[in-house]
């Protein structure tokens, strides 16, 4: 009862309650961004790659895959899945034309065959032999369908040039214009895909949720009916990543707080002390979340996951105070004894974040902001609120005390061996060049992709053959030039271009010239006379030839209009044409052929385009890290006015970095952006340990004071380990990277502070002051 | 490959000849009949004549076989319809869209698109079939006695005429398997 009415306790509880409400309110306003794009460094090539990919024709693609054991069962399986799709709330548009649509496309190619046919690369259709061959084929075509009643377009294409154009388009689009059951069937007849345009992108999580529901229904139904079916799309990667991060952030946050508090309670043994100590962390989080909700609105999931673990750093100021206050009579004396170390430690921790906002990477900027705000507000609350609320009181000292005997030379040698062993791995360190390796492993989705790619060329990879131009016509000309060049060089590399259906102006003019120069009416009439067709059958076609200069194109069929217009992208005030290539092996070959032929083009590949920039960034970041070390070293020299003390203060940080790089080699093998974040944090944390130990030796602390210093560092290390260690269990590699490297780094920091620093400082003092500690 | 899928497209849009509930159905849905067809059009120099036979054993088993001038088979087995021309591999045709199979299949579907009037002239049943909506067909005339059709005449708006004359028709008896 006495406790409940204790005003200090009430104040503390009030602050905690208000903070909890603020956190709840603020987190409900913050929009979570689980994408990896916030990890991409911003160089121009990468920016263009991402910008174009996000507007690309496959950005909203959804694939439905079906596999049956016997091909006779395929139609029923397709009907089954179609019914589920029809019932779905999503409006998915079939990107594969139905038979009616293909017929309209055929009619379009027939009606415009004169100007669609690529005379520049194909056989001359107007030679006597060719006309004969083609008219025979036309007759054969007519006779092959017993009840066929040809329409107008049939008579606008006596030489069967239209079907040739459609055939080429079909080959280059991998069978899209020869659908079966509304999709594409593999050669063995047992697998099938249907491709849809969903109309929404990766951030529309409501719709993606419906897509996942559709997937679950399709999978469930297929399992009951003994066939294999599923949905595959890029959206599902985002959803899986987002759900995993959301779940893990929540667990990380709770576990982190629980472990920290448990460790705290073990050492300080009073529940009320626990609640008091909790207050600066919760208050720090509350103000941080509120500011983010008000000024940012949207925040990266990776940055928030990191943010949850700053509890382990923020509590350090409380731990150091509560551990050491038992030694001194008043708050004033405590602050005199450890204030310098606390403030210097805070400054150097903050200083380690200073360079992150200049990284040009959104995630790192968010991590820097979150870290700076949380740690700063936690420090302020600890110094101005907690310390006055909990002044030293020797009568209430329940602190569990541990002994930290000095290990002397033995300890120093152990430390040296540890550092040397770890350093052996450093030459094997490489830089991460694949940004997608920072995401979680999407095993199930990857295996689905493998199934699809076994029989089809589809994928969700953003790989395109791209062209840039002043206007659509220029883009069409460039793409047609490229595609025809590829066709000339190889037969098994189908690449589609909208110019097959919409020729550029220059080509139209050159084809008109070709027709005028090569078409001979007499040859044509002679052949018609010997055929089944009456002499007037193709009069309209012949009139079109006579009037070739005035021919204009009709509107494209709606399906083609929509499909082809999606390939043209207006981005950053420039016009682009993107042709999906689907596979890296294809883009490599295309790029090689076109580069050798000096054909203007470029390849958009988000993965490859980020690779160089990423590695360059990581190398530059290491340089920034060295700069941070230098800055901190200078701050320490100014503070201590002594090189050795500055060095010993920094040594735990340097050891931590060695440990961090060593674990990188063992775990992921590649130094990535998250390892960089860890390195920066370890710099700030490690120097705290170094400052406390150095100061203790410098000020000639008593044995008890020194032991308490080791204990406060030990408790700090434990809480930081608890805060970051839980991140090591994350399935997301970026979070795992930061967790594992922080864990090892802290261990190395503490070991250095406990085993190496006392030996170095003792010998330094002995040598230069003649006194022993 | 080009011909296969072009033919598929055209098969989809083919004119169909139909029987309906009001038209004579072969007894027990079993039929063997030989045909000669005449296609006359202003885009043809002369009439194209083709010949062959139709055999049916139940609603799910049907074969339209043209022998002259080109070997063509349109085969229905259960719900699967295939088209084969000369030596090419049979290709499956979309069931829903291939109206040719309405011939001996679903009388109700015919009634959705056409009106049928029956008259009797000289002891012969004459069915006059008119499309309800917009169609390339102008009219169809079917002549028969009881369950045996003798002639089908299709008149298109573009003045094309397609006439099928049937002979040696046998209904009600299971046809020889060799015909399939």
Image (cartoon, coloured by chain):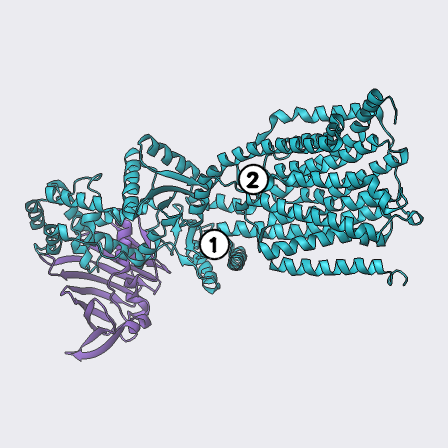
Provide the chain ID for the residue under circle 2.
A
Q: Nearer the viewer, mark 1 or mark 2?
A: 2
The answer to which of A587 and A749 lies nearer the viewer is A749
Measured in 3D between alpha carbons, the distance from the residue under mark 1 to the one under mark 2, in whole angstroms, is 28 Å
Q: Is residue A440 visible?
A: no
Provide the chain ID for the residue under circle 1.
A
| Residue hosting label 2 | A359
The answer to which of A10 and A188 lies nearer the viewer is A10
The answer to which of A200 and A585 lies nearer the viewer is A200
Residue A598 percent coordinates (x, y): 31, 32
The answer to which of A386 and B86 lies nearer the viewer is A386
The answer to whether A602 is drawn above or below residue B63 in the figure is above
The colour assigned to chain B within the rendered structure: purple
Determine the image quadrant of residue A731.
top right
Residue A153 percent coordinates (x, y): 19, 56
Q: Which mark is residue A201?
A: 1
Tell whether A608 sits left or right of A599.
right
Quick one: which chain is cyan? A
Tell whether A89 sits left or right of B177.
right
Determine the image quadrant of residue A585.
top left
Give the residue at x 91% y 47%.
A397
- Looking at the rendering, in which quadrant would you find the N terminus of chain A? bottom right
Tell whether A573 sits left or right of B162.
right
Q: Do discs 1 and 2 belong to a common subunit? A: yes
Q: Is residue A320 visible?
A: yes
Tell whether A547 sits left or right of A338.
left
- Element under disc 2: helix
Earlier sequence position, callout 1 versus callout 2? 1
Judge the density around disc 1: few (<14), some (14-19), many (≥20) Cα neighbours within 10 Å: some
Residue A291 percent coordinates (x, y): 63, 55
- Element under disc 1: loop
């Amino acid at each position: 009862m006495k406790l409940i009415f204790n005003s200090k306790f009430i104040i503390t509880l009030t602050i905690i309650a208000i903070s909890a409400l603020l956190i709840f309110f603020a987190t409900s306003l913050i929009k979570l961004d689980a994408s990896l794009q916030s990890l991409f460094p911003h160089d121009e090539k990468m920016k263009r790659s991402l910008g174009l990919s996000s507007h690309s024709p496959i950005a909203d693609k959804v694939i439905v895959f079906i596999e049956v054991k016997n091909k006779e069962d395929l139609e029923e399986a397709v009907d089954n899945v179609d019914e589920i799709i029809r019932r779905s709330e999503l409006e998915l548009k079939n990107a594969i034309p139905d038979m009616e649509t293909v017929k309209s496309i055929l009619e379009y190619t027939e009606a415009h065959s004169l100007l669609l046919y690529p005379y520049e690369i194909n056989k001359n259709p107007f030679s006597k032999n060719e006309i004969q061959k083609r008219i025979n084929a036309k007759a054969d075509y007519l006779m092959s369908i017993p009840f066929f009643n040809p329409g107008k377009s049939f008579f606008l294409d006596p030489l069967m040039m239209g079907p040739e154009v459609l055939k080429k388009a079909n080959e280059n689009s991998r069978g899209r214009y020869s659908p079966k059951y509304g999709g594409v069937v593999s050669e063995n007849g047992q697998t099938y895909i249907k491709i849809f345009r969903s109309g929404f992108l990766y951030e529309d999580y409501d719709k993606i949720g419906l897509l996942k529901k559709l997937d679950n229904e399709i999978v469930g139904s297929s399992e009951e009916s003994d066939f294999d079916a599923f949905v595959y799309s890029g959206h599902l990667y985002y959803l899986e990543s987002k759900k995993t991060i959301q779940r893990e952030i929540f667990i990380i946050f709770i576990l982190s707080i629980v472990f920290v508090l448990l460790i705290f309670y073990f050492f300080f043994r009073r529940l009320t002390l626990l609640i008091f100590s909790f207050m600066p962390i919760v208050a720090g989080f509350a103000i941080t979340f509120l500011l983010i909700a008000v000024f940012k609105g949207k925040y990266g999931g990776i940055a928030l996951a990191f943010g949850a673990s700053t509890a382990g750093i923020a509590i350090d100021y409380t731990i150091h105070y509560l551990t050491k206050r038992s030694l001194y009579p008043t708050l004033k004396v405590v602050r005199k004894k450890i204030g310098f170390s606390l403030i210097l430690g805070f400054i150097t921790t903050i200083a380690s974040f200073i360079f992150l906002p200049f990284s040009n990477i959104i995630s790192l900027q968010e991590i820097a902001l979150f870290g700076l705000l949380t740690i700063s507000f936690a420090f302020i609350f600890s110094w101005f609120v907690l310390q006055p609320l909990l002044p030293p009181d020797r009568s209430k000292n329940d602190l569990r005390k541990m002994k930290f005997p000095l290990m002397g030379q033995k300890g120093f040698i152990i430390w040296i061996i540890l550092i040397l062993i770890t350093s052996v791995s450093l030459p094997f360190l490489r830089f991460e060049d694949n940004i997608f390796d920072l995401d979680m492993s999407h095993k199930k989705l990857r295996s689905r992709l493998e199934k699809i790619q076994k029989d089809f060329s589809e994928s969700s990879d953003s790989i395109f053959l791209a062209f840039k131009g002043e206007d659509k016509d220029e883009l069409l000309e460039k793409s047609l030039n490229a595609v025809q060049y590829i066709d000339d060089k190889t037969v098994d590399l189908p690449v589609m271009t909208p110019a097959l259906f919409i020729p550029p102006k220059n080509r139209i003019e050159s084809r008109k010239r070709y027709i005028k120069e090569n078409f001979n009416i007499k040859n044509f009439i002679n052949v018609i006379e010997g055929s089944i067709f009456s002499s007037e059958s193709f009069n309209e076609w012949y009139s079109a030839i006579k009037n070739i200069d005035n021919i204009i194109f009709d509107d494209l069929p709606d399906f083609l209009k929509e499909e082809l217009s999606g390939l043209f992208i207006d981005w950053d005030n420039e016009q682009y044409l993107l042709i999906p290539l689907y596979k890296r092996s294809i883009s490599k070959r295309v790029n090689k052929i076109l580069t050798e032929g000096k054909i203007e083009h470029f390849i958009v590949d988000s993965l490859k385009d980020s690779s160089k920039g990423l590695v360059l960034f990581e190398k530059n970041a290491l340089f920034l890290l060295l700069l941070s070390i230098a800055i901190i070293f200078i701050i320490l020299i100014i503070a201590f006015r002594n090189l050795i003390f500055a060095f010993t203060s920094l040594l735990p940080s340097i050891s931590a970095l060695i440990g961090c790089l060593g674990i990188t080699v063992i775990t992921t093998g590649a130094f990535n952006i998250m390892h960089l974040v860890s390195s920066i944090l370890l710099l700030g944390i490690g120097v705290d340990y170094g400052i406390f130990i150095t100061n203790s030796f410098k000020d000639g602390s008593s044995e008890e004071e020194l032991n308490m210093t080791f204990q406060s560092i030990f408790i700090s290390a434990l809480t930081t380990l608890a805060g970051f260690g839980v991140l090591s269990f994350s399935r997301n590699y970026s979070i795992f990277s930061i967790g594992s490297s922080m864990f090892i780094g802290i261990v190395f920091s503490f070991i250095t502070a406990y085993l190496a620093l006392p030996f170095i400082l003792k010998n330094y003092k002995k040598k230069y002051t003649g006194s022993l500690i | 490959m080009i011909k296969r899928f072009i033919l598929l497209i055209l098969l989809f849009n083919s004119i169909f000849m139909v029987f309906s509930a009001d038209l004579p159905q072969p007894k027990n849905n079993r039929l063997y009949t030989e045909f000669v067809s005449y296609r006359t059009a202003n885009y043809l120099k002369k009439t194209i004549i083709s010949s062959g036979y139709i055999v049916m054993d139940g609603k799910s088993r049907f074969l339209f076989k043209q022998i002259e001038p080109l070997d063509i088979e349109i085969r229905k087995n259960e719900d699967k319809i295939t088209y084969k021309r000369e030596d090419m591999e049979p290709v499956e045709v979309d069931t829903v869209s291939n109206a040719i199979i309405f011939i001996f299949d679903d009388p109700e579907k015919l009634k959705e698109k056409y009106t049928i009037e029956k008259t009797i002239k000289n002891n012969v049943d004459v069915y006059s079939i008119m499309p309800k909506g917009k169609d390339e067909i102008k009219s169809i005339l079917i002549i028969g006695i009881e369950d045996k059709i003798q002639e089908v005449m299709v008149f298109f708006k573009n003045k094309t005429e397609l006439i099928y004359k049937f002979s040696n028709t046998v209904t009600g008896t299971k046809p020889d398997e060799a015909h399939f």
